[in-house]
Image (cartoon, rainbow, N blue to C red):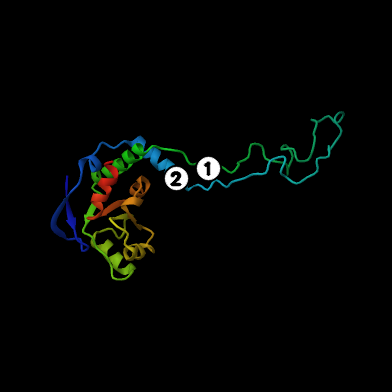
Amino acid sequence: MEVKVLDINGKETGRKVQLSDSVFAIEPNKHAVYLDVKQYLANQRQGTHKAKERAEVAGSTRKIKKQKGTGTARAGSAKSPVFKGGGTIFGPRPRSYSFKLNKNLKRLARKSALSLKVNESNLVVVEDFTFDTPSTKNFINVLKALGLENKKSLFVLGDTNKNVYLSSRNLKASSVVTTSELSTYAILNAKSLVLLEGAVDGIEANLSK
């Protein structure tokens, strides 16, 4: 599959880049995508929730009333879960929500997400660029030239570029990652996916293993 390469002004450069059909043109596996996104979101959870149980709440363990003759249920202490201020029954405990997925499934999920972007015509290839100094204004000009100023976008760089990354950091709707940081969630969370020309080979190398 061939895709036209644009410059940062949104104009065609006259060059085309060849995208691998085995990465960018597969039949999307939606269940693999679901599992990979689910794992990503699960890994974001801190899991530090905690409720005090019967043994942990403050209070006396004295028997609060006699066993028989009151006409009500027997009760051992004020820390019982049935009383106000008592412990919580089966409350949340600190835990990890992470779970394991094998590498082949995660690769399939990323390839499926990339293919979905191609099918939706939301993938653009731009020639490699950089800024002399970090400049949010310059990055906004690039977005405007590509028609992405009002869209959520993800830029994928071939190598780390500090100036480009810092230029995009103040923009909520745009983010910049390298090929090694690319995830299924990041791809799907953006309306438009912008691949720098130097990132194509890295993506294909990572997903063709």
Above or below: residue 25 compared with residue 167: above
Which amino acid lies under the numbered mark 1 shown in the image of this protein? Answer: Ser
Quarter-wise, where is residue 29 in the image?
A: top left
Q: Is residue 190 visible?
A: no
Residue shown at the point (23%, 53%) measured from the top left: 124
Image disc number at residue 43? none
Residue shown at the point (29%, 52%) measured from the top left: 192
Q: Position of residue 45 (x, y in %)?
A: 50, 47
Residue shown at the point (38%, 37%) measured from the top left: 102
Residue shown at the point (78%, 45%) measured from the top left: 59
Q: Position of residue 206 (x, y in %)?
A: 29, 46
Q: Quadrant of the N terminus?
A: top left
Q: Quadrant of the C terminus?
A: top left
Q: Is residue 102 left or right of residue 14?
A: right
- Work out which residue is located at the far left of the displayed protein and give it: 14
Q: Position of residue 38 (x, y in %)?
A: 43, 41
Which amino acid lies under the numbered mark 2 shown in the image of this protein? Answer: Leu
Q: Position of residue 13 (x, y in %)?
A: 14, 59
Q: Is residue 142 left or right of residue 47?
A: left
Image disc number at residue 96? 1
Secondary element type, mark 1:
loop
Mark 2, residue position:
41
Q: Residues within 10 Å of mark 1 (few under 14, many from 20)?
A: few
Q: Residues within 10 Å of mark 2 (few under 14, many from 20)?
A: few
Secondary element type, mark 2:
helix
**Considering depth in this image, is 141 or 38 the residue closer to the camera?**
38
C-alpha separation, residue under disc 2 versus residue under disc 1 = 12 Å
> If you read the primary sequence from the N terminus, does the residue marked by circle 2 or circle 1 appear first?
2
Q: Is residue 143 left or right of residue 39?
A: left
